[in-house]
Amino acid sequence: MARVEVESEVTGKVWKVEVGVGDRVAEGDVLVILESMKMEIPVESPHAGTVAELRVAADEPVQEDQVVAVIAT
Amino acid sequence: MGWEEEVQEIHRRRKLAKQQGGEEGIAKQHAQGRLTVRERIDALLDPDTFEEQGKATAIPDYDGDDKFLGFVPANYVVGFGKIEGRRVVVGGEDFTLKGGSPNAAGLRKSVYAEHLAVQYKAPLVRMLEGGGGSVKGGGRRGGTVGDPVFSAPRFRIIADAMGHVPIVSIACGAVAGFPAGRLVAAHFSVMSRRTAQILIGGPALVERALGVSMTKDELGGAQVHARSGVVDNLAEDEHDAFVQARRFLGYLPSSVDQRAPRTATDDSPERMEEELLHAVPRNARTGFDMRAIVRMVMDIDSFFEIGATYGRSQITGLARLDGQPVGILANDCMVYAGAMTAEAAQKYRRFVEMCDTFHLPIVNFVDQPGFMIGPEAERKGTIRYGMAAVCAAVQAKVPWASIQVHKGFGVATAAHYGQDAYVLSWPSVETGALPVEGGVAVAFHREIAAADDPEARRRELEEQLRAGRSPFPRAESFAVHELIDPRETRPALCRWIDWIQPLLDDLTGPTSFPVRP
């Protein structure tokens, strides 16, 4: 089992968290939706697996390259 | 008796010069997962097309009693070859000898690479691996020290070459010091992801100067330079890097004195992709895939992206339209809404200057919300780099077509229109000095604050302004050439490609500005 850190590609704010810890996700599933420069930016799971950690909550600021979630594959 | 003896000696010396660092040196290079420079040259070029220059260059080696011991081959290999049947110059350090640090004969041939390319008007491909100069061997034997005061600056030909012929740099291993400087003095640079590093100074220098202990991968590996902009593209391995170099050169003329090669295509200029009608969502907060739009409009499989991991809000690349090579600019709204960051602006300027130098028409898919704003953007000096991008665009001499796909706000939008640009507009276009949301808050702040329900008043004003931004009035008043069905984009651009053919004939030759790294 590998743990894959999922990073934000942009600086912005967490608008919605779409999954919970323990949820099964497929590759491409949206984990978190960020708001950046007035756009909704989905952060997608790069692999199928289980959500092991969520490191952000709604309305929190995020930085470029910050880990927002960890997926156990 | 003729010259048989000397001829025999010529052949012997040619053979010796090809031995590189000997079996041991070559085995060591292979063990580290890297090719030798001669293998690289063969892998890059069309089969059996290498025409080496200076086939017998070497350094004679003597012992303390001046007894001749043998030859050390020059550790730079250079010559002509062909890529898709077109002549190029290729050169590279031989890392199996002295770690690529130039020996005397190697240095002469290395300096010659740019001269050869400029003189014969052929693109240059550099295969870089090595650490540049070494303190070893300097000043041991007495005699003259330093170059004569009248010698030409070493970098002059490297700078000049960028304004004459296409230059590709490939980082094949650790590239440090002077070779790193040479690497970035190129129009396209690529590094092999696992086996290359690019460093100004390596780990030993860094530890000595700064007390920081880092590996060469941590200092200058692929994960650093994907984001630094030092290389344009990453390659999976050396062979992938050669494939990318060949592909890049396929879009470019052999020199500024020629036109870029237009190829035959089976892709109909009249092809209209249904999906383009739905490509831009009606909800402006939802992003879309700009690269998919570019691919649908350009000749099938012709889009070659350059620099995807740097300045990511701006997409740059090469493609073909009805067989004509073109430069592509496009905004990626999934990264900062496509805003022009300091990095995106530098990438933009360099790309426009390259297209201008080689007279490639530019096709620009515009979704520009403006310069990036915020504390980080101010600290990075975004406005200075942004204006440099604007200047490069408005002074460009190449034919330019802009497709207003979505947003076009602020000064940054000026970077998206060259002189006499052909302007097509999609119904999804939104333009102005400021986007409605932020603009209303600034322009009407007193009125909003004085309202009974400020939030409702703000929304009301935004709605009114948005309604006034219909795409139709601009088309009616000829502020754009045509308002089009997005599906008509390819046929319209292919007609434009036909119109600009006489202009491209007139553009060949050097530009009035030099293109710089």
Image (tube, grey):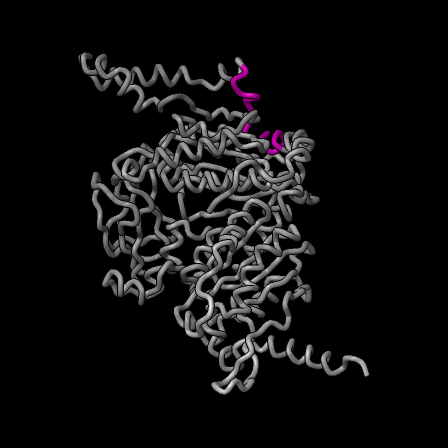
Could you tell whether B55 is left or right of B197 in the image?
right
Q: Magenta segment range?
A: B478-493
Q: Residue B417 or B486: which is nearer the viewer?
A: B417
**Image x and y of residue B422, in percent:** 57, 26
Q: Residue B359 or B499: which is nearer the viewer?
A: B359
Could you tell whether B507 is left or right of B431 in the image?
right
Q: Quadrant of the N terminus of chain B?
A: bottom right
Can the viewer see residue B40?
yes
Single out the residue that lies furthest toward the right.
B1
Residue at 59%, 62% (x, y): give it: B44
**Image x and y of residue B434, in percent:** 35, 23
> Is B299 above or below relative to B132?
above
Q: Say which quarter of the image contains residue B466.
A: top left
**Image x and y of residue B85, in percent:** 69, 56
Could you tell whether B341 is left or right of A51 in the image?
right
Residue at 30%, 33% (x, y): give it: B373
Residue at 67%, 33% (x, y): give it: B506
Could you tell whether A21 is left or right of B228 in the image?
left
Question: Is residue B64 within the magenta segment?
Answer: no
**Image x and y of residue B325, in percent:** 62, 42
Can the viewer see residue A1?
no
Residue at 58%, 52% (x, y): give it: B247
> Is B198 above or below relative to B380?
below
Q: Residue B476 or B25: which is nearer the viewer?
A: B25
